[in-house]
Image: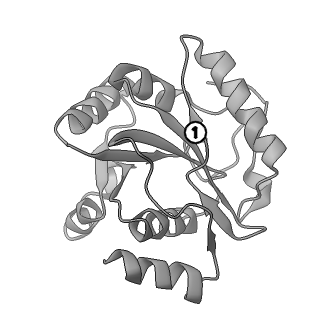
Amino acid sequence: MKPSTAHRILTRWMHWTLIDKQLPPEPKLIILGVPHSSIWDFVVAWLFYRALGGKPRVMIKQEFFFWPLGAFLRSLGAIPVDRKNPVTITRQVINAMNQSETFALCIAPEGTRKPVKRWKTGFHTFARAAGVPVYLGYFDWGRKVISYGIRFECTDDAIADLLTIQQYYKDKGVTGKHPGCLAYMDGVA
């Protein structure tokens, strides 16, 4: 899909406002997508990044990669992962980043669309291992605004970083499509 088509669908048909007008300057990065409460978050975020001219990458459990869905998901930038083995996921993501000139991994720290008590720190592991920045992206269904957010440099302390990131989102007041799915400051996994 051409960037202009994605922009039209997102702004004219779906009535979203894009805060950002161009891609982040780094060729490789991780963008958090918060809050993740609906499959529509993927659609909105994918259209947003395409509207800016980028090709977003997302991790999807490998069980969805059957024919013909698997080929379609790969064409959208999906990476099949085995969620039962976190070490394998890290290796898969780092290898995919290293094999590409540009790589924007969009990831939900909640890890699922269901309500959670704890956010996952996998994005932090990926960012530190690959030496890439994290952007604190959001799709605010209440105001219908979307952004890849501010740049965040991860430190050696994943827990402290995650608490800082959660506070950023709490202060921003973003709401999900299904607001009951949000969890802030409840801890980390």
- Point out the residue furthest to the bottom here: 13
Q: How is the image coloured?
A: one colour
Give the answer, above or below, for where 53 lies relative to 159.
below
User: In the shown orientation, is residue 7 left or right of residue 171?
Assistant: left
Q: Would residue 138 be found to the left or right of residue 48 on screen?
A: right
| Image location (x, y in percent) of residue 54 | 35, 60
- Residue closer to the observer: 82 or 160: 160
Residue at the image position 64 percent from the left and 33 percent from the top: 119
Q: Residue 100 appears at what percent x and percent y? A: 19, 42
SS under mark 1: loop
Question: Hey, which residue is sitting farthest top in the picture?
Answer: 156
**Residue at x 37%, y 74% (from the top left corner):** 3
| Residue 15 in the image: above or below residue 89 | below
Tell which of 186 and 68 is nearer to you.
186
Residue type beneath disc 1: Pro
- In percent of width and height, residue 37 lies at 65, 57
User: Which part of the image, by quadrant, shows the N terminus?
Assistant: bottom left
According to the picture, the residue beneath numbered tag 1 turns out to be 109
Give left or right: position of 125 versus 98.
Answer: right
Q: Is residue 183 above or below residue 173?
A: above
Image quadrant of residue 180?
bottom right
Figure quadrant of the C terminus = top right
Pick whichever, 138 or 80, lies toward us. 138
| Numbered-mark total | 1
**How packed is label 1: few (under 14 Cα within 10 Å), some, or many (20 or more)?**
many
**Picture coordinates of residue 81, whole percent (x, y):** 32, 41
Residue sitting at 39 percent across and 32 percent down? 84
